[in-house]
Image (cartoon, helix red, strand yellow):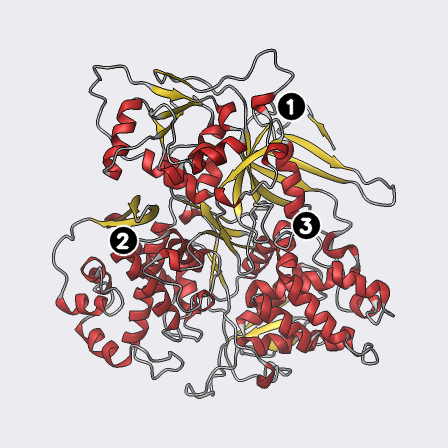
Amino acid sequence: MRLAHPSRQDIFRAETEAGSSSIKMSTWVFRTDSGSLQQIQIGAADLVAAHSAATSAWGWVGGFAGIRHILANIHNPFSNSTITNVFSCLGFRPSLCQILTFQGVVYLQDGYTDDAFGGDLRTQFLGLTICALAHECGAAQAIHVFMQCLAPALFLQASKGIPGMREALYTQLNDSSQVILNEGATRGLPKQFIQAIADLRLPACYHAFRKFNQTLDDPLLPEISMIGGLLKWIGKQHEESYFTRSAMVARVAACLKSVGYKIGQIRIWDGNGDPPILNRGVILVIAGSADTDPYIMDLDALEEQAFTSHYQLSTVGALLINALHFRCDKLPESFQTWFENVQNLISANLDFHWEWSYANDRSSMKIISTWNSPQGRPPSWSTRLASLDFPNFADRVASCYTLVGSDEMLRVVLKTKNYWVSNAHIPDELIRYRIITASILLAVIGKLAGPGFDNLRHVTTLNLVMPTWIMKITQCVNYGMEYGFPIYIAVALIASIHCGVDPEELGEGFLTSDETESLNGEVIGWRNGIYAVVPSLLFEMAPTLKAIGFRCSDTFIGNLPVHDKGFVRSGHERQLIFTEPDNRAPRLMEDETRSQAPPSPVVGPPVAAASDVEMYINIERIFQTRDPDLCFCGRVGGEVIGVVGVTEILTTLLRSFEPQKKCPGHEEVAQAEIMPASFWANMRWVRDRLMSKSMSSHNHHTYIPVKGNRCWALFLAGHINSSQGILSNGCFDCAATKRSNAFEKEGNLIVIGYQ
């Protein structure tokens, strides 16, 4: 590996060359938004970790390795000619993703595109198709409708004589779906799809427009069945236009066309006059009685799944209309106004702050809500209505319902609250009630998500047809408002409106009164394609107040270890186990090349000083476990000296940042055991030291000077969490006193001298 540093550019290349000229050379370009090359130096550990993450089960490279193996070793039934009749690859953008490093956010770009989506026309066709369908349907439905409606026409007719081919393709797509979608995310497909749809200026309602003579009592056909009809039409390779009443079908057609499908113009027709005549066009019929959707998918072949909706805060009105899944008489502008009024009320009166607590010999963190005192008293009917979903803070949000309701709304909702919204006989009061309730949830969770959330794109499975989505989310919100939000509940809520997490996927028992009894207790983030929510610490990489909170992103983050369902879980310092610590740990205390022995702890006054050895930390998965849990890995001289978990670091930071009085001065000069960072770096010593009953053989507090060194400060913050240590932000005595008062007991303390 070699690093080249071009002048006058904020980029450098890491070129990894294979040993044979027959294997391609990949050039990775790293760039930053600001800073010079002298200021931004990416560690070798970050480069290696990025390569490892790219090819992992949660990465974005190699999603078609299994299918390519099948194509190379079995008589190939997948003909390029049948594909080229309906598809022509338009090329690929370079792969681009964020890498979170100690030096800040770095953008990794791989300009080599020959191997995109497997490097074969057949696999590229599969990858682009699944990405386009999944943008609207989600991965599971995308694969299902493709295998049911398009694959038979293009692939599977020729493979009937090969037992197991259909099942093998289906299995490979399911197993690799996340990697395939991740590659699509790195190549900019989600934003490409969003732009293609926006350019068509389709109606805000995504779903089907009824014929004027269709009775309103008739249930709507599931949208996925109409998408299946579009795919069947593509497979038949007809030249005439395809007419549909589903705006979602038109959106899917736009996505497919943008990646190379041979689809003509996509037009809207109001049903008046002669129908448009287009070559291979798709026509969205929004009125009239023309026949549409001739190849609609068999309902018996459907699998019920949640649909996804991409939105920004400026398009919440359209999101709310789509969540009703039928054409109502309200305009998206009306719902947008309702939402913005609710958001203004919530934002002006609600705030969140993080707290830590100590009980039963363990620390925990929660996010606590605080409300301003309400101005005026809302009508009693609105308070009672609010209490149906928000019993713990009904008086704070009751005024939201007065924006669009009256006491009649309460009377109607008490009778119909759990109804499905599917036809015109549903009272308007119930629709308005669900719109306002959903707006409250969006506003509260958006506030919880932290600064910058309002400026991003989001995806959600919000469904207002049935009460299930609201019930699941309000359960979590009410729990958090009463007891405080554990990190994993806050993350799940944010992911539900930003990452497209379906509340149904959280499962029963997600809420628990005791965090230690829940497998979700260490969930700290979520990633779904380009959408992610993580602790702010991963972006700030510094022991500051800005590190406390959440940060959302709508650009793919490449170096996050992610579990199967998309959640990110924090590892633990104690999970690192060296079987031979003497051989594996850096022998800093026995360095034979030194003319003198390394410094040992001494007793003296704690004075701010720099660390005596440099450290580098980076984000990795814990390498000695099967689970892809996230950790900060610390290295001295390139050797691992330990790993620490994100929750451990955050807990120590919260403990350290608690407000304290101004130092009054101290009559006596404090004494502490001054421990050099190099001494701490010996893993065997740390293990034995932490397991001992006393943290100090001299009966003094321990002070580790690492002034201004962010790496050491974060690493040590994680290490000392189990012993309830603290960072000193000034006076050593004040820090020690604050800690002793917090735990109401005496004892030796580890203090990190960062400032």
State which quadrant residue 330 falls in: bottom left
Local crowd size for mark 3, using a 10 Å CA cut-off: few (<14), some (14–19), many (≥20): some
The disc placed on residue 346 is: 2
Percent position of residue 377, x then y: 12, 59
Callout 3–callout 2 Cβ contact below 8 Å? no
Percent position of residue 115, x then y: 76, 51
Q: Is residue 152 left or right of residue 525?
A: right
Which secondary structure, mark 2?
helix
Please tell me whether mark 3 or mark 2 is closer to you in this view.
Answer: 3
Local crowd size for mark 2, using a 10 Å CA cut-off: few (<14), some (14–19), many (≥20): many
Amino acid type at mark 1: Arg
In front here: 35 or 448? 448
Q: Is residue 259 left or right of residue 694?
A: right
State which quadrant residue 701 falls in: top left
Percent position of residue 160, x then y: 81, 80
The disc placed on residue 173 is: none
Percent position of residue 282, x then y: 63, 71
Count of marks placed on residues: 3
Q: Earlier in the sequence, mark 2 or mark 1?
A: 1
Instruction: Provide the residue designation for mark 1.
Output: 8
Q: Earlier in the sequence, mark 3 or mark 1?
A: 1
